[in-house]
Image (cartoon, rainbow, N blue to C red):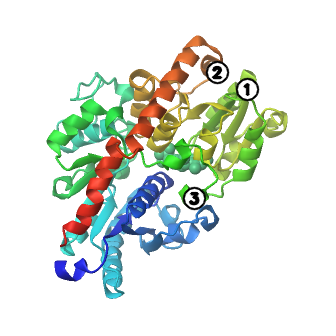
Amino acid sequence: MGKERKAHGAHCLVLSFPAQGHINPLLQFSKRLEHKGVKVTFVTTRFITNSINKESSSSTINIEAISDGFDQGGMAAAESHEAYLERFWQVGPETLAQLLDKLDNSGNPVDCVVYDSFMPWALDIAKKFGLIGAVFLSQSNAVNNIYYHVHQGKLKLPLSNTQLLLPGLPPLAPHDMPTFLYAFGTNPAFRNVLVDQFSNIKRADWVLCNTFYDLEPEVTDWLMKILPAVRTIGPTIPSMFLDKQLEDDKCYGFSIFKTEKEACIKWLDDKPNGSVVYVSFGSVAVLDSEQMEEIAFGLRNSGSYFIWVVRASEEEKLPKDFLNASNEKGLVVTWSPQLQVLAHEAVGCFMTHCGWNSTIEALSLGVPAIAVPHMSDQSTNAKFIMDVWEMGIIASVDEKGIVRQQAIENCIRELLESDRGKEIKRNANKWKTLTLDALDEGGSSNKILKSLSPSWFILFL
Ligand code: UDP
């Protein structure tokens, strides 16, 4: 098998879970591999590849699909998360094996499968085919550490209401921990997915983490002791964005949503530097109407310019007349070219739900954050944003768990107008420089990636 493979350059199949927050980093990772001379086939589910907004991508990467059992409607077509995952876990492995066969038979054999950690079964398939299997973890190493402890039975669920001390991490209060570990029973299917990421991880040839060493040194050192195959290769953000060469859309990802690029950039172009609040809660968060109203009035009362991403499915929760009344100061879009927006000089701060991608995008582009975590690992990311990296502030919540308009207004004023805001902006810029260093030719993430790419080839010689 090895001899046959010698004739072609390394070919890597990169498999993503069908969610925007997974597709983006894995696609950017694919592009970086391609840049290093590795041939890449990017794979996600049929429903997603059919609905991908092709105009948002001029990538040369080959795209293939597997089935999740819901080719027509994806996750939304399933009765429940449980039903979706059960069916996907039945059909996915089978169709991945068929795809590997198909590529083999068409003269494009795969050498290595880089799979999303949400789908650990992909490692079994890779090994069945005698391939290298590398897992890609798309959350922070702090969060990896927490889920690893749960998987090992060292953190018992549901978590108790006390502060937690874990190796390589600052003390974590209950509200700093990923929500699924507390809300026992609210989404057991996804909690299992999160914990199962570590079920067979010791058999993976590499454990690729979408973070960089200087961002999480202590916890990375600890993880590497436990899992020697850990390699920090992030952030998987096109370095072109960091250099502000924004015109090249090739460096952008695929979007499941229709991106209002022209509208956003044109609107930003005539706003003063650092004056705009960019607001986005990512691709899945569903806010309740009360929270939407508080955000709307907080934004309006702050008197600042703002761009707010409100997905089409959330639009009806906007207060009546909000759009008309905010015409002068605000722009509401259903999806933005987030990296381009964050890299724009007019943007002064980012009100974010603290999904890991949004977190590292803000940090890499030196944009201070107002953290409004919603669920999952977002509260842990928020804790790091404020207390460890000191590049943002967490908006306070009331006893109902709602961030009130006054809190929103205060956070905006603090970041855009106060001395503390200036200090936070300096820190954010420091992280931007450190990100560029990590991605630079001699930088930590780039060196690791370079050392991995040829070995995918060498291993078969
Ligand atoms: N994003 C975007 N346009 C938007 C909102 C989000 O391009 O209007 C991108 C963002 O840049 C990030 C991803 O969608 O790469 C969201 O991932 P994240 O982990 O932040 O949140 P999730 O959607 O997984 O909750």
The residue at which mark 3 appears reads as: 255
Disc nearest the viewer among 2 and 3:
2
Q: Are marks 2 and 3 in contact (CB under 8 Å)?
A: no
- Residue occupying the far bottom of the picture: 105
Residue 366, percent across and down? 53, 32
How far is mark 3 from mark 1, CA to CA? 28 Å
Q: Look at 44% across and 74% down and name the residue there.
A: 64
How far is mark 1 from mark 2, CA to CA? 9 Å
**Mark 3 CB within 8 Å of ligand 1:** yes
Q: Is residue 236 shown left or right of residue 12? A: right
**At label 1, which amino acid type do we have?**
Ser
How far is mark 2 from mark 3, CA to CA? 30 Å
Q: Look at 15% across and 40% down and name the residue there.
A: 225
Exactly how many numbered labels are in the figure? 3
Q: Look at 38% across and 58% down and name the residue there.
A: 82
Checking the image for residue 16, the label placed there is none
Residue 283: in sight, yes or no? Answer: no
The residue at which mark 1 appears reads as: 304
Disc nearest the viewer among 1 and 2:
2
Q: Nearer the viewer, residue 282 or 178?
A: 282
Q: Quadrant of residue 66?
A: bottom left
SS of the residue under disc 2? helix
The residue at which mark 2 appears reads as: 416
Q: Which numbered disc flags the more N-terminal residue, 1 or 2?
A: 1
